[in-house]
Image: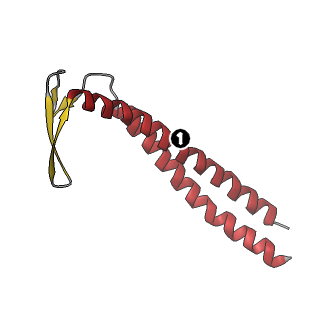
Amino acid sequence: MAAGRIAMAVIGVLMLPLGVGAVGAGLVALLGGVLSSDGGPPTCDGKVMRPDNRCHIIRNGQGESVSYEEMVRRKESGLRDGLIIGGTALGGGVVLLLGGRLLIRRAQP
């Protein structure tokens, strides 16, 4: 029975730093998503785009020409993606923290 308690305690202790890391990553993703979406028009090289503009982007060593509509979509998806990824990581981190604490408490005699 003592081996089971030791295993629970070890797993609980390992879950705590993982939970802290996941909470931190979740907060960064949430803030990144919120801060990347300022509600204004899309920009290309710091200049405001208009519907008839195209933005030339070099990505992975390849040139790409992106329309105004695509830039609007990318800008809107940044907020959504940040909220989804950040919320998931934050929720998972909280579960790890609470689960780790519970395992440590149950492992105590």
Where is mark 1, residue-wise?
87
In the rendered structure, the answer to whether residue 72 lies left or right of residue 65 reads right
Image point (51%, 55%), residue name: 21
Q: Position of residue 80 (x, y in %)?
A: 43, 34
Instruction: Classify the position of the C terminus by image quarter.
Output: bottom right
Q: Position of residue 50 (x, y in %)?
A: 17, 21
The colour scheme of the drawn protein is secondary structure
In the rendered structure, the answer to whether residue 94 lies left or right of residue 44 reads right
Disc 1 element: helix
In the foreground, 77 or 108: 77
Image point (49%, 45%), residue name: 26
Q: Position of residue 105 (x, y in %)?
A: 78, 60
Number of callouts in the render? 1
Q: Position of residue 46 (x, y in %)?
A: 16, 31
In the rendered structure, the answer to whether residue 34 lies left or right of residue 107 reads left
Packing grade of label 1 (10 A; few <14, some 14-19, many >=20) is some
User: In the displayed structure, would residue 105 be above or below residue 72?
Assistant: below
Image point (32%, 26%), residue name: 38
Instruction: Classify the position of the N terminus by image quarter.
Output: bottom right
Disc 1 marks a residue whose amino acid type is Gly
Image point (31%, 34%), residue name: 74
Q: Quadrant of residue 36?
A: top left
In the foreground, 84 or 1: 84
